[in-house]
Image: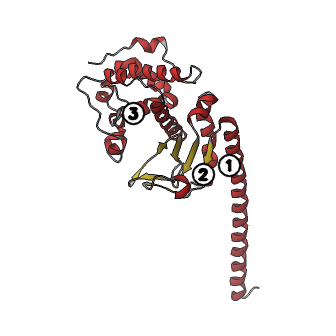
Amino acid sequence: MLKPQNYIKFFILLIVILLSSWLIYIKIKLSAYNLEVKRQSIEIKNLYGVDIHYRYTPESFFPHDRLGRGSQAWLKHIRTTLPLVENFLSKYPREVIRKNLSALFLLGTLEFNGKSYGGTYIDSAIYISTGAWFRYSDSSLLGSMHAEFSSILFHKYEFPKQEWETVNKPSWRYLGSGFDMLGRREIYDQTDELRQNGFLQGYSQASLEEDFNVFVEWTFTKPDRLRKLGSQYERIRKKYQLVIEFYKSIDPKIDIPRITPDTERGEKASP
């Protein structure tokens, strides 16, 4: 029979062995994740010419913007987000991507002026927050990528601003900017009144660009729902059509869902 002191030594040894085994397992797992992330990043670079950045430092991520702050994304989050990046990029002809998108930065958290962002863009680069402890949903991450890329296209090509403004009520004025709306509860509102006025959610009221961003996000991540709303609300249908026409004017081969004849009729006109 073991003496009490020997029991203690035995359990200490067992804990040390278990901890060592766990650390070795984690190291092997992280090494495998790292190799897979590198492989995926190289494939994306070779196919689309987009540099993937995921090792966070303020100097490399925000070299010309001191207001930007972020954090290192979890390697396992990066690993599961990169297939979504490929999905996002595959919706556009490679020439469109190579011409308009140079880099994609993946972070854990993303802030500007103390406000949290799901994504943003700077010049021809997109910044995406994958989440802190828990990764954002696939739909949310894909939506952010398409929305931020839509802003790059919005500023680079001739967007039909006048036609878009005409869809809104004559007395309507946007509230300011996306930054002004961040942190307010109503940004997630999806009411009948908003839809009657041509807005998919509260955040759409921030600016014309944000309104357009939300439509693009829904076009690629919630096309069936958007088509249904387009059949019910005339202003939503008209904005949806403008999104499609704008993207097709950039390149007819962009894989953007179209409005079907059934949804073009519109069943519920705006007042």
Q: Position of residue 140 (x, y in %)?
A: 50, 40
Q: CA distance from mark 3 to mark 1?
A: 33 Å
Counting the numbered discs, the total is 3
Say which amino acid is labelled 3.
Glu
User: According to the image, label 3 marks what residue?
Assistant: 209
Image quadrant where one finds the C terminus = top left
Answer whether labels 1 and 2 touch (C-beta < 8 Å). yes
Residue closer to the observer: 26 or 64: 64
In this picture the colour scheme is secondary structure
Using the image, tell me which numbered label, if any, was put on residue 37: 1
Q: Earlier in the sequence, mark 1 or mark 2?
A: 1
Q: Earlier in the sequence, mark 3 or mark 1?
A: 1
At x 52%, y 20%, the residue is 248
Q: Earlier in the sequence, mark 2 or mark 3?
A: 2
Residue closer to the observer: 69 or 228: 69
User: According to the image, label 2 marks what residue?
Assistant: 54
Say which amino acid is labelled 2.
Tyr
Answer whether labels 2 and 3 touch (C-beta < 8 Å). no
- Give the vertical position of 157 relative to 261 (above or below): below
Label 2 Cα neighbours within 10 Å, binned few <14 / some 14-19 / many ≥20? many
